[in-house]
């Protein structure tokens, strides 16, 4: 039996407003633009896709299941700008067919710089998921699928976690398939679910590409590809950005018709042979077949599957270094508004905008990017940092 494990990443950052060296206020974020983007994506993606998935869950009476990783940033913006989206997610949660994953509240790179902040953001996120959806997450998904053995060991030390999501990187897997459950060489009790990036990218990136030899991608064709996993695995981990539906792949491409038809096609390609599971169910259902040994950091990004999309140049390294230098000072200030602003600056998107790899990796780095160039992004970010540093330096009265 091949089980589809569908997981959707849902995230929108707090984008910065244009902030010059002559600005002195602490209003760093472009509220109007963030509201505009959130409302646009809610209209094109979040509402129609979530309603469709809710309909599919009801139609298939619990046989169709999915998982979400919603950042604290996007949940806050849904609450403020599109509460109707949050309501539909809560309706989905009530079905019992949806799992909400754990991650850093601010979609941050904190694991690389501060384990204290990493832990704090995980706890903040878990509390929010419990409050909104009534679930305590037990499967962890790090920002940008950044992963190594040490991360698995650390997550295990937090207690309560049974699994971690990671990229199925070819250079780590070698001849092996991502379509199994694996385990890290350390961290007893933690199981690993690896993204099948080929089939995931068929939906996320190639769906509307008319020059792709397999275009058009129909639900029955994709169901047959999933069915072929039988005999070479028992899981098809489809991990994609939620904006794939309606935003990256517009409604005119037929992406919603594809999603609507997919469960029926999966169930009928060979009755009883294939199903849908949540990440927790996949871990409970299958024993690991071997170790996934990742001594160095990997991620989902680009052809290299490394961290160069966020740490590939001196601007990115400097911006992150200067930000985390302020952590202790910010936290000792006791200023909750300052801490909130600092944490919003930990979001990985700010450093993604500084990436200079465009010519190698195409438009993926430009999507929703408010800047004309990586250098423009860096200058704007550092102007904000100068003001935040001044606020942090102020001694409490």
Image (tube, helix red, strand yellow):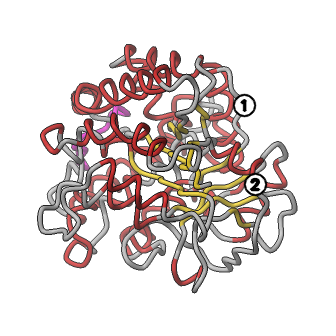
| Lower sequence index among marks 1 and 2 | 1
Q: Nearer the viewer, mark 1 or mark 2?
A: 1
**Label 2 sits on residue:** 155
**Label 1 sits on residue:** 136
- What quarter of the picture does the C terminus occupy? top right
Residue 201 drawn at (x, y percent): 35, 61
Hey, which residue is sitting farthest right in the picture? 188
Residue 200 in view in this figure: yes
Badge 2 element: helix
- Characterize the magenta stretch by its predominant secondary structure: loop
Q: Are marks 1 and 2 in contact (CB under 8 Å)?
A: no
In this rendering, position of residue 286 left or right of residue 105:
right
Residue 16 in view in this figure: no
- Tell me the quarter of the picture where residue 83 sits: top left
Q: Residue at x 76, y 74 (%)?
A: 290
* Other-residue count near label 2 (Cα within 10 Å), few / some / many at <14 / 14–19 / ≥20: many
Residue 260 drawn at (x, y percent): 33, 34
Q: Does 147 lie within the magenta span?
A: no
In this rendering, position of residue 295 left or right of residue 380:
right
Mark 1 to mark 2: distance in Å?
A: 15 Å
Q: Residue at x 12, y 68 (%)?
A: 211
Residue 318 drawn at (x, y percent): 44, 69
- What quarter of the picture does the N terminus occupy? bottom right
In this rendering, position of residue 147 left or right of residue 160:
left
Query: Which stretch is magenta?
Result: 15-28
Q: Looking at the picture, does residue 98 appear above or below residue 174?
A: above
Q: Residue at x 69, y 62 (%)?
A: 181
Q: In this view of the protein, which residue sits in the foreground, 115 or 97? A: 97
């Amino acid at each position: 039996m091949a089980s589809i494990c569908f997981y959707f990443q849902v995230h929108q950052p707090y984008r910065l407003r244009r902030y010059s060296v002559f600005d002195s206020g602490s209003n760093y974020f472009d509220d109007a633009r963030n509201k505009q983007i959130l409302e646009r994506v809610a209209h094109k993606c979040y509402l129609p896709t979530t309603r469709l998935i809710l309909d599919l869950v009801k139609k298939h009476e619990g046989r169709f299941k999915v998982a979400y990783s919603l950042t604290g940033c996007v949940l806050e913006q849904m609450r403020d700008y599109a509460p109707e989206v949050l309501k539909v997610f809560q309706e989905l949660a009530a079905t019992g067919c949806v799992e909400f994953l754990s991650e850093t509240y601010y979609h941050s790179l904190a694991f690389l710089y501060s384990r204290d902040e990493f832990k704090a953001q995980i706890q903040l996120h878990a509390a929010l998921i419990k409050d909104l959806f009534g679930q305590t997450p037990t499967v962890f998904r790090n920002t940008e699928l950044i992963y190594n053995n040490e991360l698995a060991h650390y997550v295990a030390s937090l207690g309560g976690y049974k699994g971690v999501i990671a990229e199925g990187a070819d250079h780590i897997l070698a001849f092996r398939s991502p379509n199994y459950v694996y385990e890290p060489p350390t961290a007893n009790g933690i199981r690993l679910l690896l993204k099948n990036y080929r089939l995931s990218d068929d939906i996320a990136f190639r769906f509307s590409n008319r020059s792709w030899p397999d275009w058009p991608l129909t639900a029955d064709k994709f169901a047959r590809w999933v069915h072929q996993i039988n005999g070479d695995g028992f899981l098809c981990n489809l991990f994609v950005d939620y904006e794939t539906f309606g935003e990256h792949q517009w409604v005119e491409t037929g992406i919603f018709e594809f999603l609507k038809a997919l469960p029926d096609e999966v169930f009928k390609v060979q009755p009883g042979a294939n199903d849908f599971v949540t990440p927790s169910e996949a871990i409970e259902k299958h024993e690991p077949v071997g170790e996934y040994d990742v001594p160095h950091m990997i991620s989902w990004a680009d052809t290299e599957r490394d961290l160069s999309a966020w740490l590939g140049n001196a601007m990115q390294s400097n911006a992150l270094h200067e930000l985390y230098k302020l952590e202790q000072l910010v936290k000792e200030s006791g200023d909750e508004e300052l801490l909130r602003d600092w944490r919003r600056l930990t979001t990985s998107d700010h450093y993604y905008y500084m990436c200079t790899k465009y010519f190698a990796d195409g438009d993926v780095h430009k999507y929703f990017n408010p800047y004309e160039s990586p250098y423009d992004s860096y200058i704007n970010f550092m102007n904000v940092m100068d003001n935040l540093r001044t606020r942090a330096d102020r001694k409490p009265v």
